[in-house]
Image: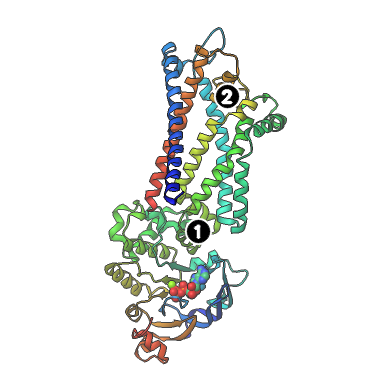
Amino acid sequence: MDNHILESKSVNVYYDDMHALKNISMKVEANSVTALIGPSGCGKSTFLRVFNRMNDYIEAFRMDGEVLMEGKNIYHKKMQVDELRKSIGMVFQKPNPFPKSIFENVAYGLKIQGIKDKEFIQNRVEKSLQQAALWDEVKSDLNKSALALSGGQQQRLCIARALAVEPRVLLMDEPTSALDPISTAKVEELINELKQNYTIVIVTHNMQQASRLSDYTAFFYMGDLIEFGKTEEIFRNPKVERTQNYITGRFG
Amino acid sequence: MSNKNTEKIIEWLLRLSALVTVLTTIGIIWVLLSESVSFFQQVSIIEFLTDTQWTPLYKDKHFGIMPLVSGTLLTTFIAVSVALPLGLVIAIYLSEYAPKKFRKTVKPLLEILAAVPTVVYGFFALMVVTPFLQTIIPNLSGFNALSAGIVMGIMIIPFVTSFSEDALQAVPKSLKHGAFALGSTRLQTSFRVMVPAASSGIVVSVILAFSRAIGETMIVAIAAGQQPRLTANPLVPIETITTYIVQVSLGDVPHGSLEYKTIFAAGMTLFVFTFILNNISFWIRKKFREKYD
Ligand SMILES: Nc1ncnc2c1ncn2[C@@H]1O[C@H](COP(=O)(O)OP(=O)(O)O)[C@@H](O)[C@H]1O
Ligand SMILES: [Mg+2]
């Protein structure tokens, strides 16, 4: 794996006295899907948030180690966090559209970058909604409030919103856990298409989803990275017994 | 005495105090209404609403409420234009920027500011703000709507801040995180996501501020003069509805006379204003609650 875009080096995370991530070193391959799996509370979401510094807003959070994006330490003092997040987008577990119109939601990221060109924004909004497989359902009423959409549509809207600024990496924290099976299938299909152009890191508690979608899988257990490798190998012959037990559903 | 009896007594006491409140309100409205009706039997509503002079205490009597309404609205608008921007900025700072500990100490302090007796604010307007403003605006009268309005604005800042801050805190954290994750700065998150999402609560705070300002008496009585005048000029003395009521109540106008009844007509007007404002804010709050449920 030499075409990696993200790398964590000996990352330790603490919430007050609780050691939530223990010495995690891992590389994320560019233009691939990496799944983070493990029982709940093992640190998957924490690790995901390490990459776009969303843990910074948690008061109890402390971290040591290094996190590199294309070789640059994103925890460096001079790092501009808002710039970083323009190249690392995030989709949350629960859809969180802004109480604005569908159009304004998708255009938001462009507008805060100071882009004023109406035609450019219009085109990008359409393109992102198409990428998120939502365009056909909403094209006739882009001015409708995003809150009027169904849960599945809201989540695809949030994906479109993240894609509109053309990030390099997309972090997804259990993006389908709040969705019905049909919406879930749509989002999975979407992830499969997006990996041509994006690097995706996805947290999931669904083993089938991990094996269907991902190229690499990382198994976490109580803050430790137990096993990391090609998804095929992890699922076909895991090296650690605990991984085996988790994947086959014997615990978790 | 058994527990059950204590319960019963407490229940009755609570019921009684609720009853007293309701009866008082009904009593006030009844007195206002009946005295106003008797006023309007002697003065036509048309004259009341259209005459441009209010001189019920003079020989040449006019009963046009407009000068008092204009005085009231003038000081109120000045107050709200001071309180809204400042109150909102402080609320945004407290809610989005300040550390939690700072917020927890400053908010109660601000609320103490709201508890300073208004007579103190009134003298502050008259003795400090007006002389200061006169150095900038030489033709400013000693009594004027401007200083009274500004100081009234300062008085209601904590009001706007407190309500707006509550509204900002009520916005789901997931929206804030969504905005940050898209690369918004704190400023962008505050003004493009948090404030719009809290807008109905903020509007309610402004309406309540309006209704507080409309009913404010002491500051305007001390610092704005007592000259009913139909004007939008903030530099000259004016009179508000509340001030007029105080002036007549304290004066030697005989009870039951037409002059005396004017204060009920004026009070009725005030009541209508605040009643409408409170209803609007109630309606917005109800709608707002439905949206987030
Ligand atoms: N904001 C927080 N404050 C304190 N502890 C937290 C916080 N978020 C998560 N934790 C703790 O860190 C551990 C890992 O949590 P998390 O990363 O959410 O796990 P996962 O996503 O795998 O379920 C858990 O024990 C959790 O209780
Ligand atoms: Mg999680």
Residue, disc 1: A113
Farthest residue to the left: give it: A182
Q: Which mark is residue B6?
A: none
Residue B113: x, y in percent?
63, 42
> The disc numbered 1 marks a residue on which chain?
A
Question: Could you tell me which secondary element the residue under label 2 belongs to?
Answer: helix
Note whether A86 is above or below B25 in the view shown.
below
Give amino acid for label 1: Gln
Residue A45 in view of the camera: no
Q: Residue at x 44, y 12 (%)?
A: B43
Note whether B180 is above or below B123 in the view shown.
below
Q: Residue at x 55, y 46 (%)?
A: B162
Q: Residue at x 48, y 38 (%)?
A: B207
Residue B52: x, y in percent?
50, 16
Q: Nearer the viewer, residue B20 or A106?
A: B20
Residue B16: x, y in percent?
44, 37
Q: Nearer the viewer, residue A74 or B146?
A: B146
Same chain under badges 2 and 1? The reply is no
**Is A249 on the left-hand or right-hand side of B76?**
left
Q: Residue at x 46, y 37 (%)?
A: B17
Residue, disc 2: B243
Note whether B77 is above or below B105 in the view shown.
above
Farthest residue to the top: give it: B59
> The disc numbered 2 marks a residue on which chain?
B
